[in-house]
Amino acid sequence: MSLNLGERCGLVMQSDIRSMSIECARMGGINLSQGVCDTPVPPVVLQGAADALMQGGNTYTHHTGIRELRQAIADKQRRFTGVGFDADREVVVSAGATGAMYCAFQALLNRGDEVIVFEPFYGYHVSTLRAVEASPVFVPLDPSDGWSFRIDDLEAAITPKTKAILVNTPANPSGKVFSRDELSLLAEFAIRHDLFVFTDEMYEHFVFDGRRHVSMAALPGMRERAITISGLSKTFSVTGWRIGYALSDERWAASIGYFNDLYYVCAASPLQAGVTAGLRALGDDYYLGLSAEYEAKRDLFCKALAEAGLAPHVPQGAYYVLASTDCVPGATARERAMRILRDTGVASVPGSAFYHDGGGEHLVRFCFAKEACVLEEACEKLQKFRFS
């Protein structure tokens, strides 16, 4: 037979995150591999979606989202970051943050363009870049110094093909929260080399130890070149709803919206209404409460990891933790992750999923976005089986 899969299929095969989730389900374990965030949804969000369903909000919306949601997103962005966006011209609601990022890449990158990506990276960022035939160029973060970067490494990554830099803060999987000083260095770097900056700020309300999230677009000179990607999936615990968005200067937003129309037509209509209700009704105390709740979960889980012999890199934000597997038998990160799953019944992701060229073999990533009873059970299982 002469029929074959397209060449792009090699770029988007099943991720280790997904495959470990499947293996965990097969074994009946506790899934701390995938960032599902199966905590309760705010009732106002559920009621908003239910009302829209019952009132006939089930047809296509504008391709950039219902205006009420775009305005609510713009209002929230101004309130928390100080950056203003025009709800009619600079906000694009998409099918999740990954959908928004894919449309932004399609609109602004050309085949062969290079994008600087910090490592460890979120695999979907890299796969999405490759799906639009752009090339990631990796710059390492140093775990011994709070996942810091060196400006010399960034300069060494620049070539005539460099078009952008991608910044994930708070970061998946490392939990790094880029400080204002670090972002200022990156802003100066981007301006000096005339680069776009794509930011994934999905975990903006999950920051710990008194830290504050800083949006790249808020820095001098960055409003016109930053493409801010975020969403409500994690904030409202509705990962299956797929409601994300891109915020950018109107010169870029129109084309991002056109690609969103082509690929998705629109995000799910009643679910847009649900998150709009949440954005309108929930005050700052809700968002501050998220940080406090997840900081407590982080502390509980990192303590359990340490007692289990899986030394954690304590995260500054988001809801993931990378842990050392130096004491776990196995030749590869995947073998060690499978050993942990078999011995404890708790699933993680091999650290190699977040590195290129053989890195991360002595790390695994856990997600602690679980209800208290589930997380406590996972902690007990890990603590009963000490690796040494």
Image: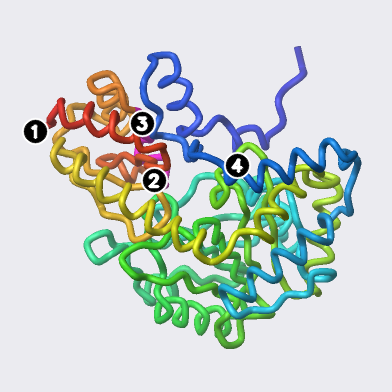
Q: Earlier in the sequence, mark 2 or mark 4?
A: 4
Q: Amino acid at mark 2?
A: Asp
The residue that disc 4 covers is 238
Q: How many marks?
A: 4
Q: Which residues are magenta?
A: 347-356
Point out residue 56 in the picture as x, y percentages from the top left corner: 90, 39
Q: Residue at x 65, y 32 (%)?
A: 9
Label 3 near label 2: C-beta < 8 Å?
Answer: no
Classify mark 1: helix, strand or loop.
loop
Q: Is residue 386 above or below residue 77?
A: above
Which residue occupies the foreground of this view, 47 or 307? 47
Q: Residue at x 44, y 58 (%)?
A: 289
Is residue 169 left or right of 128 when viewed as pictured?
Answer: left
Label 4 near label 1: C-beta < 8 Å?
Answer: no
| Residues at marks 2 and 3, CA–CA distance in whole angstroms | 35 Å
Which residue occupies the foreground of this view, 133 or 320? 320
